[in-house]
Every structure is written in structure tokens, then in C-alpha cells.
Image (cartoon, grey):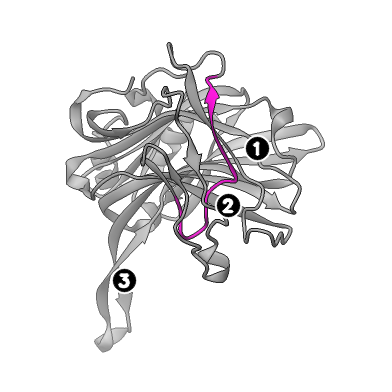
Amino acid sequence: MPRNLVFCVFLGLASFAQFAAAQSPVVPGSGTRIWYDDFENEEWAYIPNNPKASHEQDNQTRLPGGMSNNKMWGESSKRGHPDHIERFHTPQDGIPGSEGSLLLMTLQSNVPGRPNGKLGQDDLICRIPGSYSAGSYPNCVVRVYLQPFEKWEQYTAAASFGFRATVTGSRRKAGGGGLFSSSKTEREQSWPGIFIEHRVTEEGSRAFWVIRGSERGDYRGPEITETGWYTIGMSFTPDGRCHYYISEGVDNLTPQDLVGSHKPYNFTVESVQGMFFNIFNHDDGKSWSTPWIIDDPSFYVGRGGGRSR
């Protein structure tokens, strides 16, 4: 489905208040850039300090954890980092003048050395300093290169890539009933994002953008019919919504690239703590993930001024 049509469907289902609030989202790449990495330094390297963490599966963090030599990237203590992180020559049609990008692949996406045949995921964390209120219009953007489909991991149907933000939000939850009815505020950390889902069918590969998530959960966005470079981003506004953008190519995002505006899982976003990348694979001990390449990930605060490169 074309991205503009997806957004129109969302608007048609929204209440008037939601519609009005979604009229002025911030385009990712707006404001003052406070964190970015362009991978142009030929000495860029990642020091894994393996074995990596797998706290989500077996409560093991295995410190000290991986870290890039420029101190801007780090391992997730929850799930560990991708098994192959390499500065890579920028593929054709990338950002003009870019010589360096980042290649991400993983093999052992659950517990290292103990493959279980299940879908797993690893995280690479952007070490963004501080926490930013939704009122400061935090936003983030990255270019991602999609390899030709024949190079994708040939797993039946699964998530393959994710670009996510770490946020804290709140929502009201009703309890009891009748004279004993009550409500309380739940406050939780969550991780909205833009994912790529890959499906292997008899006709060949099919891939979709997936928005994680709306008030009711995750949903599919546009189908990916062409590989190559894309620009994706998220922004946050004082009304507590996350705005999701997707565009083919490496040009700066525009208002027309908006594919959805939501309170993720019905939580009002109050603050943003950073962003990170997910790399998924079928953890059978031999199947490498799809090779993903990213360039110029950036984090901004504010409504105007600076723009992504």
C-alpha cells in the first residue's frame, strides 16, 4: 500500500482531537543535532569484548560489554550486540560524498554458543547523552541500505531489522467497578520503532515496513518492492505522540513522508532517552542475518534550524 494511503487510512480512523494534534508533527532531522556518526573516520572500529550479553534469556550481562573506539556506540546489556559490526564502504547511490557506512549482521542472536533455532535479536545502542522531554521535540533519522532480496536471510516469515527509540510514557488504567471503580497512572519505558518484516513465499521474497506501534499495537506499512537506500525517522511532540516517516532514497525527509502518528500502545510519550538498532536472525548456529547497512544516524532536539546532511 502506498505510504500516503496508509497515512490517510489512519487519519480517517482518528478522532477529531487526534487529527488536530497530528497536524504539526516535526520532520525528523529538524532542530539542533546533538548526536550523530557519519563513519567517515577510516579508523572507526568496534571492540566487542565477547562473550556478549544475553540478560533477556539467561540473566547474564557479561561485562564490560562492547564499545566503539569513538565511544558513541555500545552493547545492549539486555540482548547483546550483533556479531559482525564493521565500517563499510558506502554502497552506490548513498549520501553524496559518503565513503563510510556501518555494516551490521548477527549469527548468535539469543545466548552465545547455545543456538536454539528460534528467532532472536541483538541491539546496537547509540550512546546519546541525557534524556529529552517530548516538549523539546526530540527526533531521529537514519539512512538504511536494503540489499538485493537474494542476499536476505531465507527465513519463512520474521522481523529482520528495526530502528527504535527508548521512551518513557504514561497512561490511565481503570480498575474495579461500580462504587469501587478507580483509576491509576501507569508509567513505563517502551521502544517504538520502524521495522522491516521479511516473508519468503513460493513467488519469492516479500518485505514490509512495520510500525511499532499504534494505540492498538503494531501494523504493516508500505510493502517494499524496490531495494536500495531508504531514509527513515521518528519524531516526538508535546502531545505525547510518535510520528513515523519513511522515504525511498537518501534525501532529507519531508512532511509528505509521514506514514503514521500515534501514542505507542496508548502511552503518552513524556521523554526520549535515545535510539538503537535491532538485527534479527534465525538462531540455528549457521544462518547469518540479512546484512544491513546504515549511514549517518542522527539525533536532534527542537523544531527548526539544523537539517540532516
Question: Which mark identifies residue 173?
Answer: 3
Q: Residue 270 appears in which quarter of the rendering? A: bottom left
Label 2 environment density (alpha carbons within 10 Å; few <14, some 14–19, many ≥20): many
What kind of element bears circle 2? strand
What is the C-alpha distance between the residues marked 1 and 3? 40 Å
Q: CA distance from mark 1 to mark 2?
A: 12 Å
Identify the image quadrant of residue 198. top right
Question: Which kind of residue does numbered mark 2 sit on?
Answer: Gln
Residue 97, by quadrant, is top left
Residue 50 highlighted magenta (yes or no)? no
Going from N to C along the chain, the mark reached first, 1 or 2, is 2
Mark 2 or mark 3, which is nearer the start of the sequence?
2
Q: Earlier in the sequence, mark 1 or mark 3?
A: 3
Give the residues drawn in magenta, as a range: 75-90
Residue corresponding to mark 2 = 121
Q: Name the quarter where the C terminus is drawn.
A: top left
The image's mark for residue 290 is 1
| x and y percentages locating residue 218 in the rendered image | 50, 50
Image check: 50 left or right of 113?
left
SS at mark 1?
loop
For residue 24, side relative to residue 56 (left or right) = left
